[in-house]
């Protein structure tokens, strides 16, 4: 990419997209474009087609997606598969029709089987059944990476698919119903601490920034307390789903952005082919190669928040996949490695949450 190349970041307001956007600008790229979902509905083919024909981007980061945590994935199953398939198909097709030089598709490590060998290499794809709770989302992401791979094989395009591990960072989603595990835990523990300290000013400020089931800081203490209790947030304890035993790997979102720009600038599809007879597993895992249990993570967050209440786990609720550590050999050999460890990351994300 040249510094004046026209670069489209799809999903530039989201967790990864905003980090890519910030990284590109700081690196001196001067022609970066984006559209909010209100300005451009990527599920609408005609709108997407018109945008590409008008703007003619040379490079595309496809970070737009319909995302959420275990509860949202299991509840809105049709939305997760349909919406993501629509977005992917429209952007990739329009990229092809308008001669985009290179596209980077962002997937997820939930594409791998529930019982995949650990750490999970790229070759584990499609070797066994998926985790049930996020199967629709995973199938959409598998379709996306295969769409990129298939266009490359048939039309000699240069579309690369990357599979990030669990991401967290600035502009994360802290919605208690739809967020991923780490931001949800930070907010739950923080609000429980506020209840414990009877700090209603902080609680009301928090709910005015991000309402919970329509409840804001303007509602009564009774309504607020009652609503928060539905999410396991109490004055003396926080209740979390599962046993706390599952292990999860976490990557700081700004490092994910750094990896994406590194790949976009230096890696081509041809570099990822290991078997010319049957081209498979050309996607790239992006992660740290390290994991932590949900229980230990909750303790790390509690320490950072200075929380003195109890953290309880509800074993009647699903754990999800017990372990999902990715093998980062490929990305490391290509020349990229993470730097931010989870202890530093938790401090950074809590500071960001309080200040935003």
Image (spheres, grey):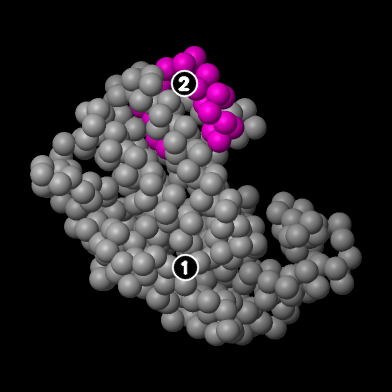
Which is more toward the observer, 229 or 199?
Answer: 229
Comes first in the chain, label 1 or label 2:
2
Residue 105: x, y in percent?
37, 40
- Distance from disc 1 to disc 2, alpha carbons, whole Å, reads 36 Å
The reply to whether dot 1 and dot 2 touch (C-beta < 8 Å) is no
Q: Give the class, few, some or many, for how many residues have Cα within 10 Å of label 2's Cα (few <14, many ≥20).
A: many
Q: Nearer the viewer, residue 244 or 234?
A: 244
Residue 170 visible in image: no
Q: Is residue 35 shown left or right of residue 175? A: left
344 sits left or right of 259 in the view: right
- In the image, is residue 147 part of the stretch drawn in magenta? no
Could you say whether the residue bearing mark 1 is in a helix, strand or loop? helix
**Label 2 sits on residue:** 52
- The residue that mark 1 highlights is 132
Residue located at (42% from left, 72% from top): 321
Q: Which residues are magenta?
A: 41-62
Question: Relative to 320, does residue 109 appear above or below in the rendering?
Answer: above
Residue in the image at 25% along x and 28% along y: 155
């Amino acid at each position: 990419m040249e510094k004046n190349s026209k670069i489209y970041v799809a999903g530039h307001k989201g967790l990864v997209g905003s980090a890519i956007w910030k990284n590109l600008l700081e690196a001196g790229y001067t022609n970066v474009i984006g559209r909010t979902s209100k300005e451009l509905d990527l599920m609408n083919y005609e709108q997407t087609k018109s945008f590409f024909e008008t703007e003619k981007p040379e490079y595309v980061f496809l970070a737009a997606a319909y995302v959420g945590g275990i509860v949202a994935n299991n509840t809105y199953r049709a939305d997760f598969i349909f919406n993501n398939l629509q977005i992917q198909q429209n952007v990739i097709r329009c990229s092809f029709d308008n001669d985009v030089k290179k596209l980077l598709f962002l997937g997820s490590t939930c594409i791998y089987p529930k019982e995949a060998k650990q750490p999970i290499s790229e070759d584990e794809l499609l070797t066994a059944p998926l985790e049930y709770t996020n199967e629709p989302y995973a199938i959409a992401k598998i379709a996306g990476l295969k769409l990129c791979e298939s266009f490359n094989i048939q039309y000699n395009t240069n579309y690369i698919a990357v599979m990030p591990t669990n991401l967290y960072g600035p502009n994360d989603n802290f919605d208690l119903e739809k967020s991923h595990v780490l931001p949800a835990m930070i907010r739950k523990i923080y609000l429980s601490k506020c209840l414990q300290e009877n700090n209603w000013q902080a609680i009301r400020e928090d709910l005015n920034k991000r309402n919970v089931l329509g409840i804001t800081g303007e509602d009564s203490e009774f309504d607020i307390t009652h609503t928060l209790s539905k999410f396991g947030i109490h004055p003396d304890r926080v209740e979390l789903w599962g046993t706390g035993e599952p292990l999860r790997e976490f990557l700081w979102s700004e490092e994910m952005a750094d990896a994406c720009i590194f790949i976009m600038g230096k890696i081509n599809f041809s570099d990822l082919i290991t078997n010319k007879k049957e081209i498979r597993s050309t996607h790239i895992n992006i992660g740290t190669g390290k994991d932590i249990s949900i229980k230990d993570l909750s303790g790390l967050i509690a320490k950072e928040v200075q929380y003195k209440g109890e953290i309880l786990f509800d074993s009647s609720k699903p754990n999800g996949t017990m372990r999902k550590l990715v093998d980062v050999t490929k990305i490391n050999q290509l020349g990229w490695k993470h730097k931010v460890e989870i202890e530093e990351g938790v401090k950074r994300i809590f500071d960001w949450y309080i200040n935003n």
